[in-house]
Amino acid sequence: MSETMAMPATTRRSRFATWIRRYFWLWIAYQTVKGLATTTFVWLPLLYVFLST
């Protein structure tokens, strides 16, 4: 019978909070890499072309 019982709200909430903490830092790392790549491969070449003309 205990297998069919619903998970308590506090357990669900704590699992969600753990998931948020874990993936928040993964998202920060992704945004950092994406920003560096965009700056390096898009904005710096455009700035170079703009300033060299």
Image (cartoon, helix red, strand yellow):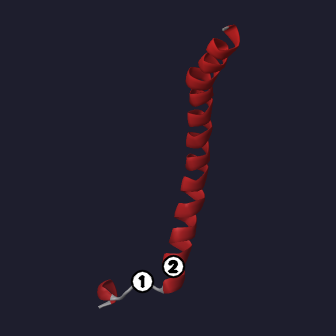
Task: Please state the horizontal and vertical placement of residue 3, each as a whole percent of the image.
Answer: 31, 84
Task: Please state the horizontal and vertical placement of residue 15, each as a whole percent of the image.
Answer: 51, 70
Task: Please state the horizontal and vertical placement of residue 4, each as a whole percent of the image.
Answer: 29, 86
User: Where 13 falls versus 37 (above or below)?
Assistant: below
As drawn, the residue found furthest toward the front would be 53
Left or right of 3 in this view: 23: right
Task: Say the numbered circle drawn on residue 35.
Answer: none
In-front residue for pair 41/4: 41
Q: Which residue is mark 1?
A: 7
Q: Residue at x 56, y 64 (%)?
A: 18
User: Where 45 falls versus 32 (above or below)?
Assistant: above
User: Where 22 falls versus 44 (above or below)?
Assistant: below
Quadrant assignment for the C terminus: top right
Q: Residue at x 62, y 38 (%)?
A: 32
In-front residue for pair 32/17: 32
Q: Alpha-carbon neighbours of circle 2 within 10 Å: few (<14), some, or many (≥20)?
A: few
Kindly identify the amino acid type of the residue bearing the numbered disc 1: Met
Asked whether the beta carbons under mark 1 and mark 2 sit within 8 Å of each other, the answer is yes
Q: How many marks?
A: 2
Quarter of the figure with residue 45: top right
In-front residue for pair 49/18: 49
Task: Say the numbered circle drawn on residue 11.
Answer: 2
As drawn, the residue found furthest toward the top would be 52
